[in-house]
Image (cartoon, grey):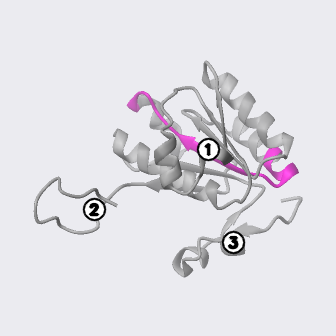
Amino acid sequence: AAHNWPALPFSIPEIDGRLPGGGLALGCLHEIAGGGSGAIDGAAAAAFAAGIAARSGGHVIWCLTKTDLFPPGIADAGLSPERLWRVTVDDDRKLLLAFEDALRHGSVSAVVGEVSRLDMTCSRRLQLAAETTGTLAIALRRWRREVDAADFGQPTASRTKWRVTEIPTAELPVNGVARAR
């Protein structure tokens, strides 16, 4: 990278020890997707992205095409509504433009863009925008159809790629009594 931006540590030695700089590099693009094709894993991935964005310190712009962002869930992950700005657009092309513009502005600490497809050209533009301002860029991969998930394994300019899946903490004595964490 042209700039030497600091890293945002997880404060978990097993993870930070494997990441260059000891955490998620600021001024870089990172991809997060649910581990499966269900809504549960998509919600877990969104909560993971919100938790990372919350630790970035300042305001966060969240770009999306669906109006299903659940503010209480995002707040539960540590991102208060006072720090969250939502940008809702009609389609993925406009979303990528809004995502890039928000990164280039430089007035926020993180930008989350809910994208379905992300090719090398688009990801490189987002990476360069993030690198210029030092803003944390998170591409939250959401798919409306299973076929749209096919490009997730393809090369992009993202610094890291994460697959997030929800699992229960322990066997419950009675099904449905507590929520999985």
Please say if 140 is above or below 16: above
Q: In which quadrant of the rendered view does residue 181 lie? A: bottom left
Q: Give how far apart the Cα atoms at labels 3 and 2 are.
A: 30 Å
Of the residues shown, which amino acid type is indicated by label 2?
A: Pro
Q: Secondary structure at mark 2?
A: loop
Q: Is residue 44 visible?
A: yes
Position of 74 compared to 134: left or right? left
Say which of marks 3 and 2 sits in front: 2
Residue at numbered disc 3: 20
Please say if 44 is above or below 39: below
Residue at numbered disc 2: 168
Magenta stretch, residue numbers: 129-146
- First of labels 3, 2 by sequence position: 3
Quick one: label 2, few (<14), some, or many (20+) residues within 10 Å? few
Q: Which mark is residue 5?
A: none
Q: Secondary structure at mark 1?
A: strand
Q: Give how far apart the Cα atoms at labels 2 and 1 are.
A: 26 Å
Position of 116 compared to 159: left or right? left
Residue 32: give x, y in percent of width and height: 54, 50
- Tell me which residue sits at (78%, 55%) in the image: 27
- First of labels 1, 3 by sequence position: 3
Q: Is residue 17 magenta?
A: no
Residue 123: give x, y in percent of width and height: 70, 41
Which quadrant holds the N terminus? bottom right
Of the residues shown, which amino acid type is indicated by label 1?
A: Ala
